[in-house]
Image (cartoon, grey):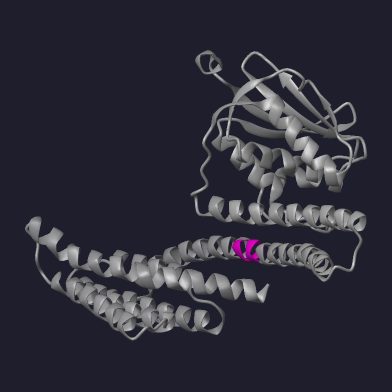
Amino acid sequence: MESARSLLALRMGSLYLRARWFWGVGFLLVPVALLLNGESGSSWLVAVAGLVTLTHAYAMRARGGEGVMSAVIVDIVATHGAVLLLSVEGDTVTAPVLTGVGFTLLIMMFTHGRPQMTALALNAGFTVATVGIVSGWQVQRMFGPLLGGGGLAALIVFVIVAYNDRVADLEMARAVTLGIASHELRNRLTGVIGVTQLLAEGKVDPESGLELLELAHREAVEAGSVVEDLLTASRTERGIVATNPEPVDLAGMVRETVAAFESHRGTVKVEGADDPVRVLADPLRAPQVLRNLLTNAVRYGGPDIRVEVERDGTGVSVLVSDDGPGVHESDLPELFTPYHRSRLGQITPGSTGLGLWISRNLMRSMGGDLVYRRDDGRTVFEAVFAAAPEAAES
């Protein structure tokens, strides 16, 4: 968990350092907007704060620095100083309080550990001092703004902490998934390397050599499936996963995919796939979805696994079912989320927790969907495809 939080802090800290360029430019635009409205006063102080922020950001980039704390302190001093001098001219404490809340939010989001508390203490001190000077250090005038600003800051901090905990959990789950995937790949490749070494040394007879080649092929196919899932998960997280739906024969695709699966994973009953059925699907991604569903049925379901092609008025469905116990009720809300593992603590060897999430995303990108249900004591995953238009069938 600690390593996941460290990774989160590095990512968010890097985001904060990049965002300071926009923050500084925004400061420079404030006096421009005031001048266009016919106001001037000491608004140039805000521009100075923007220049300080941009200069510091440029200096850090020039020397390759990643000093989040240094950036936080400079931003706090520049902003509070500008707002303080501006507010002294008037009789308001709104700007200093909102500034304090805003920077509290930034600090809590982009720092962690001991520096977090240091930055938070610095920011609180500057906020109190700013409000105090503007209010003439009159407790009655200070109390309301500080109480309101502090309450809002506490609410924001609560939300950010909850969000950070959730992201940290996801990072930990991701690390576990990568560990499982690496273990799977190593085991598969170890078998392939061992077989090829025996064949290269000529230590096996032809009949045994054929069996070993079949074994190596099965291991390579399994390794390829793990790699394909990891690549698809990476593309999906970056929002660049793409499918190219086109008219395909779903029944033929089901027969071919099941036949390849049966060659190394066991018997699967196929129903309703005798005649051609035209649907809109990606010829590469649709078999990946079916393989994932079959793999899940083998890992978690019962021995009676069936694949059924079912037609209705608006589309075509592929139902992958088994006679296993099904998904526990507590796991249903997160069934199609990435890196999800059963709350019952059951970890199946080889499971990365990505298959269902990947499959649903692929189905939806093809214009279909993937749903789960229990039907007559059977676990059913239904992949819904859009029927191909009539013109495409001719």
Viewer-proximal residue among 126 and 345: 345
Q: Image quarter for residue 368?
A: top right
Q: Image quarter for residue 280?
A: top right
Residue 185 as seen in the image, left or right of residue 301: left
Q: Image quarter for residue 99?
A: bottom left
Q: Is residue 88 visible?
A: no
Residue 170 as seen in the image, left or right of residue 35: right
Magenta-drawn stretch, dominant element (helix, strand or loop): helix
Say which residue appears at 84% left-offset and 55% top-offset. 215
Q: Position of residue 339 (x, y in %)?
A: 69, 56
Q: Is residue 366 above or below residue 157?
A: above
Q: Position of residue 253 (x, y in %)?
A: 69, 31
Q: Position of residue 111 (x, y in %)?
A: 49, 76
Q: Is residue 83 visible?
A: yes
- In reply to whether residue 90 is colored magenta, the answer given is no
Judged from this view, the residue extending furthest toward the bottom is 63
Viewer-proximal residue among 196 and 332: 196
Q: Position of residue 90 (x, y in %)?
A: 19, 68
Viewer-proximal residue among 358 and 172: 358
In magenta, the rendered stretch is 167-171
- In reply to whether residue 169 is colored magenta, the answer given is yes
